[in-house]
Image (spheres, helix red, strand yellow):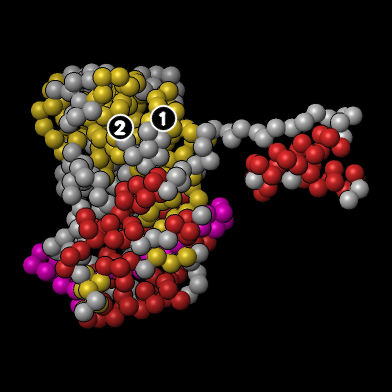
Amino acid sequence: MSHAKLFFALSRARPATLGLATFSKRAALFAILFGGFCVAASAPAVAQSWVATWAASPQAPQGMPATYSNQTLRQIVHVSIGGSKVRIRLSNEHGTRPVVIGAASVALAGTGADTASDGLRPLTFGGSKSVVLRPGAPLVSDSVDLTVHPLSNLAVSIYLPATSEIETVHQPALQTGYLSTAGDFTERSHFPATGTFNNRVLISGVMVETNLPARAVVAFGASQVNGNGSTVNANGRWTDVLARRLNEAGMPVAVVNAGIAGNRLLTDRIGVNGLARFDRDVLSQPGLSHVIVLLGTNDLGMPGTPFEPNGVVPQVEDMAAGYKQLIERAHIRGIKVLGATLPPFENALAGTPNEGYFSPEKEARRQAVNAWIRSSGAFDGVIDFDRVVANPARPIAIAQAYDSGDHLHPNDAGYKAMADSIDAKLLE
């Protein structure tokens, strides 16, 4: 090869396509050949970047909004990957009135409501300790220096000085939150808890800055993504188990949960429909590379129940159109979308206000939707959760060993089986 051709090839090569070791060797050869006008190049350092490590999708509260006044709320979040800096995202996106944040902090969690003795950082917003969270809007904190380890717990504290009716939450959190006596305890390690709650209140995301080539996978769906049926405070959702798997394999990949219990792909009821919230809850996550879509069971199950007596079960074509819209919007941004089949739900929620959630007609529709997910080729890959948790002797029902008891949601063992079934190569 002539020097001119070699110069052209090397000048166009990028570390990301060659690999750092190969790039460095070629850069050294470049320096030898053209030593008269250049110096040897070394492999560039990986630039630091922000990556989502945890999330809770905002929704309107089911029932009356909770009211707080001159109280501090401390909430525990379980991150997937770590970093050297942190930002917290708050949300009033379902609120109709402003919420005054008197102070906020993030800390390494300790035992119960307390934080570790070191590692507590006050949060600011545009340099201000106190800020107004506007109706319908999110709010991202300034970054703070805090070394966060993968799979660790953070404590996020928010002081509400004025009487505040909270209209943006996430239900259920499957993690105990703590409510203080009167006063601002955001910068206190010991927290004087007078009560607990099981919702996320105002917090909707955690981001970390890392110098690793990290990225995020977002799981998008309803209660089977949120983790309903798993043990509270045990981080037993399948997304948590997947995050542990990837960490043990040395993959710096965050697993972010964007599930809302009761959510649907096509229509509103609990949380706005999946098509409406996809950009906010998924595509806006920093560092996103993949989406796992497990959404549609409630579209099939809820119509015709006392919860929605006049609802109509959607056709397979309608579900397919919804899935394809998610895929198109993700592909525009270079994001891969993996489709998960809908798990079985025979006799689901029998004896509850959702009596009638299952029927033979709905089962036939589920089978048809799953057939489309498996065979259409629309997704970049398929995760067959249906076959993982189904009873081998009766595939229209969840296996007893994986059933949380309501015949719809897996238990800890079921969620672990789901996570363990995911081929990590799909996330490369």
Bounds of the magenta segment? 331-359
Identify residue for label 2: 154
Identify residue for label 1: 86
Q: Where is residue 407 in the image (x, y as percent from the top left)?
A: 17, 67
Residue plotted at (88% across, 48% down): 5
Depicted 117 relative to depicted 164: above or below: above
Q: Position of residue 121 (x, y in %)?
A: 34, 21
Based on the picture, tell me whether residue 266 belongs to the magenta stretch.
no
**Residue at the extreme left of the image, as rendered:** 351
Q: Which is more N-terminal, label 2 or label 1? A: 1
Spatial separation of the CA atoms under disc 1 and disc 2: 10 Å
Give the total number of marks visible in the rendering. Answer: 2
Mark 2: which secondary structure? strand
Based on the picture, tell me whether residue 355 belongs to the magenta stretch.
yes
Locate residue 166 relative to residue 239 in the image: left or right.
Answer: left
At label 2, counting other C-alpha atoms closer than 10 Å, the crowd grade (few under 14, some 14-19, many 20 or more) is: many
Q: Position of residue 381 (x, y in %)?
A: 47, 65
